[in-house]
Image: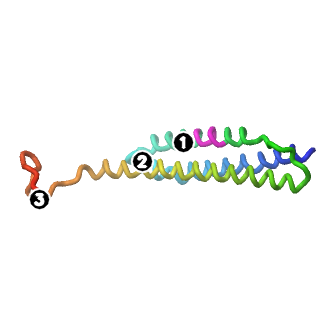
């Protein structure tokens, strides 16, 4: 096997299991946030969680596939390590970005659910807010 093909094989051997591990970790640990976001509706949370993981797989495995090609020919073992480290570094950065994007989405959903549960803010005691003129420093 020539060094370029060896690089491709090693890249796929590392990148695909890493993508699967990250997706499973997000699926398992993101469930509790989604259950909270959907007010305890576990069936809906599990469904959304599954759809998020499918999207994660599609995006990341698609990226790993598109990023497979090496521009320059790989020569010798040193070239394999250099090409592999560059490719895996980018894959790790993309997986990390996807992870933080998912955390951002989960946090926003959870914050929205908490606001819905707490209701609108209460007015100070004795004021209905209806028919009263605004007076600063009152």
Residue 2 relative to residue 88: left or right: right
**Which residue matches tag 3?**
125
SS for dot 1? helix
Q: Which residue is mark 2?
A: 109
Q: In the rendering, at what x and y percent does residue 46 appear?
A: 50, 43
**What's the residue at 76%, 55% (across, down)?**
85
Secondary structure at badge 2 equals helix
User: Which percent across, then down, holds residue 68?
Assistant: 76, 42
CA–CA distance between discs 2 and 1?
A: 13 Å
The alpha-carbon separation of the residues under discs 3 and 2 comes to 31 Å
Q: Nearer the viewer, residue 39 or 20?
A: 20
Kindly identify which residue carries mark 1. 52
Apparent side of residue 121 relative to residue 6 in the rendered image (left or right): left
Mark nearer the N terminus (2 vs 1): 1
Please, what secondary structure does the residue beneath circle 3 have?
Answer: loop
Does 18 sit left or right of 115 as displayed?
right
Tell me, yes or no, whether the two marked residues, 2 and 1, touch with CB atoms within 8 Å: no
Magenta segment, which residues?
55-60
Label 1 and label 3: CA atoms lie apart by 44 Å
């Amino acid at each position: 096997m020539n060094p370029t093909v060896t690089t491709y094989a090693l890249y796929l051997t590392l990148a695909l299991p890493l993508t699967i591990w990250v997706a499973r970790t997000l699926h398992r640990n993101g469930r509790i946030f989604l259950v909270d976001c959907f007010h305890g509706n576990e069936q809906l949370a599990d469904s959304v969680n599954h759809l998020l993981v499918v999207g994660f797989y599609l995006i990341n495995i698609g990226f790993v596939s598109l990023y497979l090609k090496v521009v320059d020919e790989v020569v010798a073992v040193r070239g394999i390590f250099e090409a592999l480290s560059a490719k895996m570094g980018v894959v790790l950065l993309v997986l990390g970005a996807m992870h933080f994007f998912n955390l951002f989405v989960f946090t926003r959903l959870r914050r929205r659910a908490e606001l819905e549960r707490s209701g609108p803010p209460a007015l100070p005691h004795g004021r209905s807010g209806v028919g009263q003129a605004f007076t600063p420093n009152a």
